[in-house]
Amino acid sequence: MSEASLAAPHHRRAALPRGFWLLAVLAGLAVLCALSVAIGTRSVSLAEIWGGLTGATETIGEAAVSKRLPRTLLAALAGAGLGLSGAVLQGVTRNPLADPGILGVNAGAALAVTLGLAFFGLAGFHAYIWTAIAGAGLTAGFVYAIASVGPGGATPLKLALAGVASTVAIGAFISAVLLPHADIAGGAQAWQVGGVGGAGFAGIRAVLPFLAAGCALSLASGGALNALALGDEMAAGLGERVMLARAAAALGAVLLAGAVTAICGPIGFVGLAVPHLCRLIFGPDYRWLLPLSALTGAALLIGADVAGRVIARPSELDVGIVTAFLGAPVFIWIVRRQKLKDL
């Protein structure tokens, strides 16, 4: 019996509620985009919002709106990339604790960029992006290799432990690199907090092809991840080329995480919390879970960015700080919810 036929009855039963929740997510995303454009240090009128959307910058309010447009777009793209990346990594590793932050992918991208800045004069959006993606990929491979040592191979628990240990070690190494480089330390440390406040259309255009490639690879892996969830032997029996499917999906996740980290800095917990929330609402079918994780991730990051502006007005909190506050309780809940033998 094929994977499609196995999933079909559940899909038919869940079609109506999934459709309803899909519309709810899209509506929520639209509302949050509008709030992101309207809310900031300066209050703006509807006329100024319309003027800013049409490109006018004659008044201070219109100029503020025009500055918030790329910020809103970047928050949506980054949130979608992180949510999708987290869902893919959880499927590839069959690990409920997997996300680009916990598995060390974001930290590896940050280390690569920091080394590039400190020793190689890294400059330009494309240089940042390629360097971050290379660091993310190397760290993902390193974490998987470490977790594979010993009996049982790369179990979910060993992957989580190896990822957390690598993240801590990389963080200490980044601090050691920055200490003697006062000329870049301030900017690098601000970047490592994670934020979308410095967004511009030039940076978005530079990162968009990488996000598109990672998104395409990740979304195309939905059927394969459904099969992998049944176990490698069952997936092979269903006709999946297990290693190729896992490698293609992981490549998509690394592209997304590396590209987002390059342009925004490392932002944690979005890739952890969003797939769990979507799984509770939409079920475990990755053909639904992946695109809905992208939409929900976009909504979450825009909402976190808006909350950061409101909480600390007239200043603001970077979105990485807000997601850490939101994500830490979710992480604790997930750990308490899972039995140790199931991790």
Image: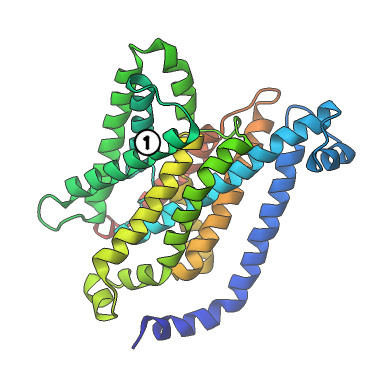
Quadrant housing the C terminus: bottom left
Residue sitting nearer the eye, 45 or 52 = 52
Query: Which x, y percent locates residue 80?
Result: 53, 51
* 9 lies left or right of 196: left
* 129 lies left or right of 14: left
Which residue shows up at 26% across the image and 68% down it? 242
Query: Which x, y percent locates residue 241?
Result: 26, 71
Query: Which x, y percent locates residue 83?
Result: 49, 52
Residue 245 appears in which quarter of the rendering? bottom left
Q: Dot 1: few (<14), some (14–19), or many (≥20) neighbours within 10 Å?
A: many
Q: Helix or strand or loop: what does disc 1 sit on?
A: helix
**Kind of residue indicated by mark 1:** Thr
Residue 14 appears in which quarter of the rendering? bottom right
Relative height, residue 123 to residue 273 (above, below): above
Which residue shows up at 59% across the image and 36% down it? 202
Quadrant housing the N terminus: bottom left
Which residue shows up at 16% across the image and 52% down it? 148
Q: Which residue is mark 1?
A: 131
**Colouring method of the image:** rainbow
The answer to whether any part of residue 283 appears in the image is no
